[in-house]
C-alpha cells in the first residue's frame, strides 16, 4: 500500500464523532425521504455513523474522509497550514499532485471550484465525495459497490483524476479510489480463464491504477511496450475502457483492441472475469464503452508489442505574416490532406496549428508537428516529407520558414522520456474534438481550410495522426468491441481547448459556447464521424451517437442488464438517461421508468 500525504493521515482514523458529523442531521430532524433521488447527508436513507464504521472495519481502515486538497490555504479550515500552502499552490498545475490525492481532479470545474488554493476563494467540501475507499484489491471495490447499492448512494470511481469530462468526481458521493490497484505481471503467452486455447505472444496483466510511466519502464527491459497514453500519470483503467489511442496505434490498433481479459466488479457487487469465453457481453462493452458504467475494472491483461525503434521528426512550418490568416490555414489544410497517405505508410504523430503562436516578442502562424516512423530510417522520413515541403515552397514561395529536426530513438521509452505530455493541470479547461476520415481530409480543401480556421479560433487546434491501418484492420478478440465504429476509418483525432476564469460562471458558459462553435465547422466537414469519448466536449450534442454510433443500442441493452438499478451513473455515459443532477443531488428524470 503506497503511503499517503501526511495531511491525509487524520482521514484514515474515522472516529465516531467524525462519522456522526458526516451522517448529517439527526433522523428526527431530517426531511422526508424522496425515493426518486440518491441519498445525501441529511436524508433519512443516508447511512448512520455505525454503518460507515462497519464499512471502515471491513476495509481494514481504508475508508477515508479526505479534506479538500486546497484547504491548506484557507484559514478556518481544519487542515489550514500557512507553511504548506505555497507548495500546494506551486504543485497545483502538475498532474502528479492531483493523482496522488484521493479526491483531487486535474481540472477545477469538475469539483465546482469549491476549494481552490488561492487567496479569497471560497472553500468547502461540497464539490467532492463525502467518503473515499482507498482500494488496494478487488474485494475492497466489491465492498464499496455493495454498500453504495444497499444504501442508495451515488458511486463514482477515481484513479488518477486525468478525466477530461468529469466522470471521476461527484458531490454527495462515495468514491472508490483505484489508484493503488497496482501490480504488473508479464506473460510469454496467455490463456484466458475458462478458454481452451492459449494466445501466442507476450502479454501483461496490470492493476487498473497502474500508470503509463510505470508500465512503459517495467516493459522496456523486456524489449516490450503497450499501446498506451501520452501522459505519465494516465492510468490504465479509464484509458482502456474509453478505447485508448496512442502513437503506436497506426500499426497496432487502439488499446481496447489489444485487451485479452479483465477482472471486473459488477454493479451487482460480484467479482467476475470477462473475456472471449465468459461474460462475453461485458467483455465487449468494457472495451470502448466507457469507464464507470458497466462495472469497475480492477485489472486487465493486454497484449504487448515489441518496442520499436522510432525515427522522430520535429517539424515547424511557420510565418510571421499573420495579419492574413488565409494562407496559413490553406497550408495547414494541404498538409493534413496528406495525412491519410502518409498514415498508410506508417507515419503517426501530434500536430498543432494556429495563426498566433507566441514566439519571443512576436507572433507566428503555421504548424508544428512531432511525428514518428516505426523501425524506419532518417532517409525514409525525408522521403515522406520532401514532396510535401516542396509543394509548400512552390505554392507559397518565401512565405513559410521550415525547421526540420530529425532524431533517432532506440526504443519507444527513449522517445517517451523526452516527449511525454507536459501540459498544465489545475485549470478550468474545456475541450472539444472530432474524428476525421480520408474524405474529410482530402475532399474540398477550401472547406477544410475554413473549418480548421474556425476550429482554432482564439486557440490552438490539433490534428493528431493517431489512426491508420492498425486501427482500421484491427480484429479484437471476442468478435469485436464497443469502440466507436468511426475510429475504423478515421485518420485524425482533432482537438481544441479553451480555459475559463475560475469562479466565473459567465466565463465558463462563454468558453463552452465557444468550444461548440469551434467544433461545428469540423462537424459539418465530417458529419458521419464522431468524437473520442475520453477527450471530448462533455456537452457534446447527440453524444450517444457521437461517442458510440451504431454500438449504442447494444451498449444500452448490456447496461440495463448488468446494472438495472443504476448503481453506476456518470455523464456522458451509456444508459444515464434515467437520471439527472439537480443541484448537488442525483435524481430520476420525471416520467422515466426505473
Image (cartoon, rainbow, N blue to C red):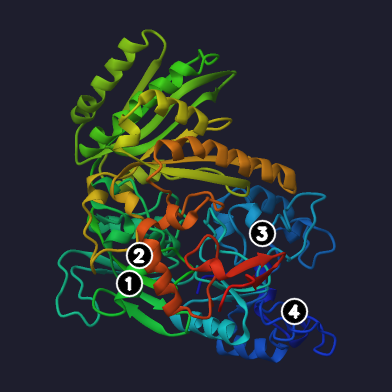
Identify the mark at residue 287; answer none if there is no mark. 2
Q: Quadrant of the C terminus?
A: bottom right
Q: Where does residue 238 sit, x and y in percent of width and height?
A: 45, 62
Q: Where does residue 290 sit, x and y in percent of width and height?
A: 44, 63
Q: Where does residue 25 sit, x and y in percent of width and height?
A: 81, 83
Mark 3 burial class by Cα count in 10 Å: few <14, some 14-19, many 20+: many
Q: Nearer the viewer, mark 1 or mark 3?
A: 1
Q: Which residue is mark 4?
A: 22
Figure check: 485 above or below 372: below
Element under disc 3: helix
Q: From where the camera sits, is residue 262 visible?
A: no
Q: Where does residue 153 sit, x and y in percent of width and height?
A: 62, 79
Q: Which residue is mark 3?
A: 111
**Image quadrant of residue 49?**
bottom right
Q: Are marks 4 and 2 in contact (CB under 8 Å)?
A: no
Residue 380 or 152: which is nearer the viewer? 152
Q: Residue at x 43, y 43 (%)?
A: 434
Mark 1 burial class by Cα count in 10 Å: few <14, some 14-19, many 20+: many
Identify the mark at residue 304; answer none if there is no mark. none
Sequence-first tag of 4 and 1:
4
Sequence-first tag of 1 and 3:
3
Mark pair 4, 3: CA separation: 19 Å
Mark 4 burial class by Cα count in 10 Å: few <14, some 14-19, many 20+: some
Q: Residue at x 36, y 76 (%)?
A: 263
Q: Which residue is mark 1?
A: 283
Mark pair 4, 1: CA separation: 37 Å
Amino acid at each position: 500500500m503506497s503511503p499517503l500525504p501526511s495531511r491525509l493521515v487524520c482521514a484514515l482514523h474515522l472516529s465516531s464523532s467524525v462519522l456522526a458529523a458526516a451522517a448529517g442531521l439527526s433522523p428526527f430532524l431530517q426531511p422526508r425521504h424522496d425515493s426518486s433521488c440518491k441519498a445525501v447527508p441529511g436524508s433519512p436513507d443516508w447511512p448512520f455513523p455505525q454503518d460507515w464504521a462497519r464499512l471502515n472495519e471491513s476495509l481494514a481502515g481504508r475508508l477515508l474522509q479526505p479534506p479538500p486538497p486546497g484547504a491548506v490555504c484557507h484559514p478556518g479550515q481544519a487542515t489550514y497550514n500557512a507553511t504548506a500552502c505555497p507548495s500546494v499552490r506551486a504543485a497545483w498545475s502538475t498532474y502528479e499532485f492531483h493523482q496522488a490525492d484521493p479526491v483531487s481532479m486535474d481540472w477545477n470545474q469538475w469539483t465546482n471550484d469549491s476549494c481552490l488554493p488561492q487567496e479569497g476563494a471560497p472553500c468547502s467540501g461540497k464539490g467532492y465525495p463525502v467518503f473515499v475507499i482507498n482500494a488496494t484489491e478487488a474485494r475492497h471495490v466489491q465492498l464499496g459497490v455493495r454498500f453504495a447499492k444497499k444504501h442508495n448512494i451515488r458511486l463514482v470511481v477515481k484513479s488518477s483524476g486525468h478525466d477530461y469530462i468529469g466522470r471521476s468526481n461527484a458531490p454527495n458521493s462515495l468514491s472508490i479510489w483505484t489508484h493503488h490497484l497496482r501490480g504488473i505481471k508479464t506473460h510469454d503467452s496467455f490463456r484466458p480463464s475458462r478458454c481452451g486455447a492459449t494466445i501466442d505472444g507476450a502479454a501483461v496483466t496490470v492493476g487498473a491504477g497502474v500508470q503509463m510511466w510505470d508500465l512503459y519502464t517495467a516493459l522496456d527491459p523486456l524489449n516490450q511496450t503497450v499501446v498506451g497514453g501520452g501522459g505519465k500519470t494516465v492510468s490504465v483503467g479509464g484509458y482502456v475502457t474509453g478505447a485508448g489511442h496512442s502513437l503506436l496505434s497506426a500499426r497496432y490498433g487502439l488499446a481496447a483492441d489489444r485487451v485479452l481479459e479483465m477482472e471486473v466488479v459488477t454493479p451487482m457487487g460480484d467479482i467476475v472475469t470477462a473475456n472471449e469465453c465468459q461474460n462475453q457481453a461485458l467483455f465487449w462493452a468494457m472495451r470502448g464503452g466507457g469507464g464507470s458504467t458497466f462495472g469497475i475494472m480492477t485489472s486487465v491483461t493486454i497484449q504487448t508489442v515489441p518496442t520499436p525503434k522510432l525515427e522522430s521528426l520535429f517539424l515547424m512550418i511557420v510565418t510571421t505574416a499573420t495579419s492574413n490568416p488565409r494562407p496559413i490555414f490553406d497550408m495547414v489544410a494541404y498538409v493534413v490532406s496528406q495525412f491519410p497517405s502518409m498514415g498508410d505508410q506508417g507515419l503517426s504523430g501530434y500536430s498543432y496549428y494556429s495563426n498566433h503562436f507566441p514566439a519571443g516578442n512576436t507572433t507566428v502562424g503555421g504548424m508544428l508537428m512531432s511525428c514518428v516512423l516505426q523501425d524506419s530510417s532518417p532517409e525514409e522520413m525525408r522521403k515522406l516529407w520532401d514532396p510535401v515541403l516542396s509543394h509548400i515552397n512552390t505554392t507559397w514561395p518565401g512565405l513559410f520558414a521550415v525547421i526540420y529536426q530529425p532524431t533517432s530513438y532506440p526504443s519507444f521509452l527513449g522517445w517517451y522520456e523526452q516527449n511525454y505530455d507536459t501540459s498544465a493541470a489545475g485549470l478550468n479547461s474545456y475541450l472539444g474534438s472530432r474524428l476525421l476520415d480520408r474524405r474529410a481530409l482530402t475532399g474540398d480543401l477550401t472547406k477544410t481550410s475554413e473549418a480548421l480556421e474556425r476550429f482554432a479560433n482564439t486557440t490552438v487546434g490539433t490534428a493528431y495522426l493517431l489512426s491508420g491501418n492498425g486501427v482500421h484492420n484491427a480484429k479484437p478478440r471476442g468478435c469485436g468491441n464497443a469502440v466507436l465504429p468511426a475510429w475504423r476509418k478515421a485518420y485524425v483525432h482533432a482537438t481544441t481547448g479553451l480555459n475559463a476564469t475560475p469562479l466565473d460562471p459567465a466565463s465558463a458558459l462563454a468558453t463552452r459556447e465557444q468550444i461548440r462553435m469551434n467544433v461545428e465547422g469540423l462537424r459539418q466537414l465530417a458529419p458521419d464521424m464522431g468524437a473520442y469519448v475520453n477527450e471530448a466536449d462533455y456537452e457534446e450534442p447527440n453524444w450517444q451517437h457521437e461517442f458510440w454510433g451504431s454500438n449504442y443500442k447494444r451498449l444500452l441493452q448490456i447496461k440495463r442488464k448488468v446494472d438495472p438499478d443504476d448503481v453506476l451513473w456518470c455523464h456522458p455515459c451509456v444508459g444515464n438517461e434515467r437520471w439527472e443532477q439537480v443541484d448537488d443531488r442525483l435524481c430520476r428524470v420525471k416520467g422515466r421508468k426505473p
